Image (cartoon, helix red, strand yellow):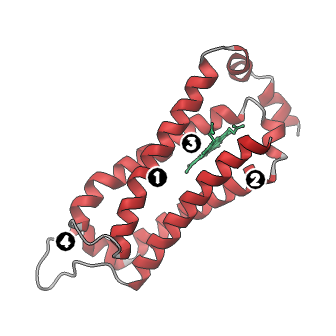
């Protein structure tokens, strides 16, 4: 609790609470981050799952993975700024704590995807008869977990604001 009250009375927190413009702009930047993350990850995961069949995964990964990663980074930085405005309230919100836990699941899932050999084969190797061009079952499952995790984070984020 002590650390949370210290955060709440810190200079950036006071600035964010007191400013007419900064808080809504940070909130808008949080939504921009979410839009980039969800907008990139959903089509990419659907392609990995085989629901979307068009486009080479290697090409799509080169575009959509950095966009999703930048969106997540923006959401994390702006989310931390929103958090310090009311840290005690957010720490006591079950929805917010579950949201952070599901973000953890999403990040662990990213690590799992990268550990699957077929992922490296798909994004690094040139297509040839010897190299597979489609995801295996493990990758399709990881892609489904990814979509569910990030959409649940979005819902929990919206509900946190709505119910607090
Ligand atoms: C990574 C660390 C993150 C932190 C610390 C964080 C923190 C926060 C905080 C404190 C709020 C304000 C809630 C309120 O309105 O009172 C918020 C709003 C929200 N967050 Fe996050 N967030 C993070 C990432 C994400 C991600 C990755 C997503 C979506 C995939 C997300 C979705 C949302 C949504 C939809 C809102 C409501 C925005 C609105 O309606 O104004 N957040 N977040």
Q: Residue at x 26, y 75 (%)?
A: 121
Judge: label 1 CB < 8 Å from ligand 1: yes
Residue 42 percent coordinates (x, y): 42, 60
Q: Residue at x 55, y 66 (%)?
A: 148
Select label 3 or label 4 by which is in front: 3
Asked if labels 1 and 3 touch by Cβ distance under 8 angstroms, the answer is: no
Select label 3 or label 1 by which is in front: 1
**Up/down of 149 relative to 19, above or below:** below
Q: Label 2 vs label 4: CA separation?
A: 42 Å
Label 1's element?
A: helix
Q: Label 4 vs label 1: CA separation?
A: 27 Å
Label 3's element?
A: helix
Q: Label 2 vs label 1: CA separation?
A: 20 Å
Residue 147 or residue 69, whichever sits in front = 147
Q: Label 3 vs label 4: CA separation?
A: 32 Å
The answer to which image quadrant residue 54 occupies is: bottom left
Residue 128 percent coordinates (x, y): 11, 79
**Up/down of 129 relative to 124, above or below:** below
Q: Earlier in the sequence, mark 3 or mark 1?
A: 1
Select label 2 or label 4 by which is in front: 2
Q: Label 3 vs label 2: CA separation?
A: 17 Å
Q: Residue at x 60, y 24 (%)?
A: 24
Q: Which residue is mark 4?
A: 125
Residue 79 or residue 47, whichever sits in front = 47
Q: Which residue is mark 3?
A: 76
Select label 3 or label 2 by which is in front: 2
Q: Which residue is mark 2?
A: 95
Q: Which mark is residue 38?
A: 1
Q: Earlier in the sequence, mark 3 or mark 4?
A: 3
- Residue pushed farthest right? 1
Q: Earlier in the sequence, mark 4 or mark 1?
A: 1
Judge: label 3 CB < 8 Å from ligand 1: yes
């Amino acid at each position: 609790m002590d650390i949370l009250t210290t955060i709440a009375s810190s200079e950036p927190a006071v600035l964010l609470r007191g400013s007419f413009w900064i808080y809504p702009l940070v909130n808008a930047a949080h939504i921009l981050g979410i839009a980039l993350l969800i907008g990139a990850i959903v089509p990419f995961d659907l392609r990995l799952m085989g629901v979307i069949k068009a486009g080479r995964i290697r090409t799509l990964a080169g575009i959509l993975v950095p966009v999703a990663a930048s969106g997540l980074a923006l959401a994390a930085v702006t989310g931390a700024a929103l958090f310090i405005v009311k840290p005690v309230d957010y720490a006591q919100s079950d929805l917010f704590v579950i949201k952070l836990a599901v973000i953890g699941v999403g990040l662990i899932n990213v690590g799992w995807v990268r550990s699957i050999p077929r992922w490296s084969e798909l994004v690094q190797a040139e297509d040839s008869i010897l190299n597979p061009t489609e995801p295996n079952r493990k990758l399709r499952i990881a892609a489904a977990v990814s979509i569910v995790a990030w959409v649940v984070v979005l819902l929990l984020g919206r509900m946190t604001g709505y119910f607090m």
